[in-house]
Image (cartoon, rainbow, N blue to C red):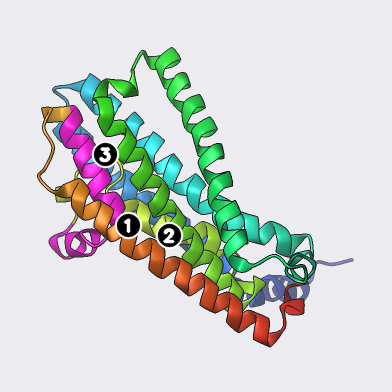
Amino acid sequence: MMMSWYRIYALILRHSYPLRRDFDLLNEMLYWPIIDTITWGFTSVWMTQNQNDTRAVVFGILFALVLWNIIWRSQSEVSRNLMDEVWNANLVNLFSTPIKISEWVISVLIQSVVKMCITSGAVIGTIFLLYTLNMFTLGWWVLPFFLNAMISGWSIGFVSAGIVMRFGPKVQSIIWSLPGIFFPLCAVYFPLAQLPEQVQRVSALLPPTYIFETMRSLVYTGTTPKYFMFICAVLNICYIFLAIWFFVRSFAYSKKRNLARFN
C-alpha cells in the first residue's frame, strides 16, 4: 500500500487544532523556552562580568535558589491544594459540608508553613553538605527573607487559584505558568540592573525583587539597601490581602455558577 500525503496532512492537521485552545501546548512550545532563555541569558552575561569572587557568586545563586524554591512551593501549596480537590472530583463534596472558605484558606497556609520548613531545611542541609556553604551565616536576615518569600508565594498562589475558580479547569495551567512570569522579572539569579530600564520599573512593584536584591547586597558587600525589606513587607501585606480577596470573590462567583462544573 502506497504512502498517502493526504493522510499525513490529516494527522498533522488533527494535532494542530488543539494549539488554538490548549494553553498547555503553547506553554511547552513557546512560554517556557522564552522564560528560560531570558533568565539564563541575563544570568550568563552577569556571571561573565563578575568572575572575581566565584565563591560569593555561587553562594548568592544557591541562596537565591533556596528563596525561589520557597516562593514556588508556597504558591504551589495553595493552588495545588485546590486542584487536588478538583482532580479528585471532591470540590462539591468538600464545600457541601459546614467548612467555610476562610477555614480552608487558614488550613492551607498552616500546611504551607510546615511543608516549607521541612523543604527549606532539606535544601539548606544539602547545600551545606555538598558545597560547605552555610546559609545561616547571614544571621537574622534569613528570617525576613524566608517569611517574605513565603508570603509572596501565597499571593501568587491565591491569584492563580482564583483565576481557576473563575474560569474553570480549562485554565489550570496558569498554576504553573504564572510563577514563571515573575522568575526573570524579580531578578532571581542576577542583579536588577541587568534588566532593561523599562522592565526594572515593573520589577520595582514586585516584593521578591527586594528580597533577592537585599540578599545579593548582603552576600557581596556585607551591607543592605536602606528600606528595601520595609518596601517588600508593605507590598507583600497589600498583595496578600488583595490576592485572598480576589480568591474569595472568585469562589463566590463560581459557587453561584454551580461548583459541579469542576467535577
Indicate which disc, 1 or 2, sits on the residue closer to the N terminus: 2
Q: Nearer the viewer, residue 5 or 236?
A: 236
Q: Which mark is residue 44?
A: 3
Q: Amino acid at mark 1?
A: Asn
- Residue 196 drawn at (x, y percent): 17, 58
Q: Quadrant of the C terminus?
A: bottom right
Q: Main secondary structure of the magenta part?
A: helix
- 187 up-or-down from 91: above or below: above
- Disc 1 to disc 2: CB gap under 8 Å: yes
Q: Is residue 194 visible?
A: no
SS for tag 2? helix
Residue at the extreme bottom: 257
Q: Which residues lie in the magenta part?
A: 196-219
Q: Is residue 168 visible?
A: yes
Q: Residue at x 75, y 65 (%)?
A: 94
Q: Give the left or right position of residue 110, taking residue 201 as reference.
A: right
- Residue 146 drawn at (x, y percent): 37, 39
Q: Residue at x 53, y 51 (%)?
A: 109
- Disc 3 to disc 2: CB gap under 8 Å: no
- 38 up-or-down from 161: above or below: above
- Residue 229 drawn at (x, y percent): 21, 47
For disc 1, the marked residue is: 236
Give neighbour class at mark 2: few <14, some 14-19, many 20+ (Cα, 10 Å): many
SS for tag 3? helix
Q: Which mark is residue 155?
A: 2
Q: Amino acid at mark 2?
A: Ser
